Image (spheres, helix red, strand yellow):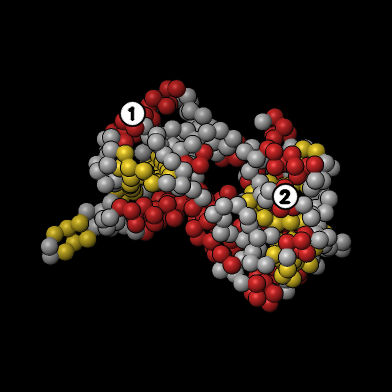
């Protein structure tokens, strides 16, 4: 099978769906790898690096010719794939709920589209989970960006001229990104607290040396959802959480918000009136900005100032760490394909009854086949 990797065309995209390491691994499986010229430049990988790993480097048309699988970061527009063979696999972050016309076009073109964002949260799929690998980097970068914008030191410093008190960092939402944000803020010397609607995260917060801030005395609210994500909160819990945040957020220097609910707008965690209680110079990094934001007034991709507080609407922070995020994403893609690889035929075989395949396959045989997408 020929595996094609195209140069990303989405605005601002810096990542690449392959690195020399995964090229060599695919070739070792028996695959042929072709890469569009310049595909890895923004991620720090030259065409020569790919060629030395054994890949063929050429034009988009040449790369797509006879390709059995096309690997991507962001789902390309249908016009980019006009030379792709029918029945080729298209594998990447296809954003199906927000790009339905593109998914319909993939089906019409006869492509078998597989969206890596919908990888089920099961043990054997952990190494294929792009959301976890990219969120880990986003959580780290959120704290680094907050520190750069803060204008003060993070750790406590004792000097002859006096003591500098440590920054107080509050992380809201303790998934992969939140846990990495906690760990990074702790490494920088901040006083860290965190909250989540899922009670199971309390021990995780404590294990990283942070203080858990949780709603108490509201029974039956666990917030556990499918795949470990949070669900919608009850009105009672929402009210109790608002009161808790009111009393805590005014004391914080930096807040990182990470709360997302798949397929729905991001939950509102911080209102404008709560922003007004924070002291001037405080920083908020909203990692849910592209889904509408956890913070009232967030603008995706921009920093805005409200009541003297800077609100950073983070937009795909993994892109700002292109080399590392490309490496992790590329390994996720390799781990997926290699898990289904038939060594005798030198092709991946995707059984219809497999839990992973059922979750991520969007189109097949010229039509949309994913129940989740059809229901949406």
Mark 2 = which residue?
Answer: 79
- State if disc 1 and disc 2 touch (CB < 8 Å): no
Q: Is residue 50 above or below residue 330?
A: below
At x 44%, y 55%, the residue is 141
Near mark 2 (Cα within 10 A), the count class, few <14, some 14-19 or many ≥20, is few
- Tell me residue 248's x, y (percent): 30, 37
- Is residue 335 something one can see in this rendering? no
Residue 305 placed where, x, y %?
32, 42
Q: Distance between the residues labelled 2 and 1?
A: 50 Å
Residue 103 located left or right of residue 264: right
Q: Earlier in the sequence, mark 2 or mark 1?
A: 2
Spot the residue most to the right.
345
Tag 2 secondary structure: helix
Residue 95, quarter of picture: top right
Residue at x 81% of width, y 57% of height: 68
Q: Where does the N terminus fall, quadrant-wise?
A: bottom right
Quarter of the image for the C terminus: give it.
top right
Q: Which residue lies furthest to the left in this view?
A: 161
- The crowding category of the residue bearing disc 1, from other C-alpha atoms within 10 Å (few below 14, some 14 to 19, many at least 20), is few
User: Residue 303: x, y in percent?
Assistant: 38, 46
For the residue pair 65 and 188, the one nearer the viewer reads as 65
Label drawn at residue 48: none
Q: Residue 243 carries which label?
A: 1
Of helix, strand and loop, which one carries label 1?
helix
Q: How many marks?
A: 2
Residue drawn 58% across and 59% down? 15
> Is the residue 47 above or below the residue 67 in the image?
below
């Amino acid at each position: 099978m020929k595996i094609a990797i195209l140069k990303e065309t989405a605005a601002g995209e810096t990542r690449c769906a392959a690195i020399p390491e995964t090229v060599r691994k695919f070739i070792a499986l028996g695959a042929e790898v072709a890469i569009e010229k310049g595909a890895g430049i923004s991620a720090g990988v030259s065409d020569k690096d790919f060629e030395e790993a054994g890949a063929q480097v050429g034009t988009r048309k040449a790369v797509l010719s006879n390709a059995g699988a096309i690997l991507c970061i962001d789902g390309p527009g249908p016009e980019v794939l006009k030379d792709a063979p029918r029945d080729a696999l298209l594998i990447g972050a296809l954003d199906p709920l927000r790009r339905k016309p593109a998914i319909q076009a993939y089906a019409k073109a006869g492509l078998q589209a597989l969206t890596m964002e919908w990888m089920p949260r099961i043990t054997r799929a952990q190494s294929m989970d792009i959301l976890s690998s990219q969120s880990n980097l986003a959580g780290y970068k959120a704290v680094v960006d907050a520190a750069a914008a803060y204008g003060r030191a993070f750790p406590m410093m004792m000097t002859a001229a006096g003591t500098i008190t440590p920054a107080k960092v509050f992380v809201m939402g303790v998934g992969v990104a939140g846990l990495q944000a906690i760990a990074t803020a702790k490494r920088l010397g901040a006083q860290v607290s965190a909250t989540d609607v899922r009670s199971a995260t309390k021990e995780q917060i404590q294990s990283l040396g942070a203080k858990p801030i949780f709603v108490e005395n509201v029974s039956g609210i666990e917030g556990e959802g499918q795949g470990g994500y949070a669900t919608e909160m009850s009105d009672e819990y929402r009210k109790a959480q608002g009161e808790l945040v009111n009393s805590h957020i005014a004391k914080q220097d930096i807040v990182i918000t990470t709360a997302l609910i798949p397929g729905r707008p991001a939950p509102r965690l911080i209102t404008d009136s709560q922003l007004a209680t924070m002291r001037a110079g405080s920083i908020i990094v909203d990692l849910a900005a592209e889904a509408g934001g956890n913070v009232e007034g967030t603008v995706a991709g921009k920093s805005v100032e409200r009541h003297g507080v800077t609100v950073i609407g983070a937009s795909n922070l993994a892109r700002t760490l292109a080399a590392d995020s490309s490496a992790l994403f590329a390994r996720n893609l390799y781990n997926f394909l290699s898990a289904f690889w038939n060594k005798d035929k030198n092709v991946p075989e995707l059984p219809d009854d497999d839990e992973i395949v059922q979750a991520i396959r969007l189109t097949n045989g010229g039509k949309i086949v994913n129940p989740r997408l059809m229901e949406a």
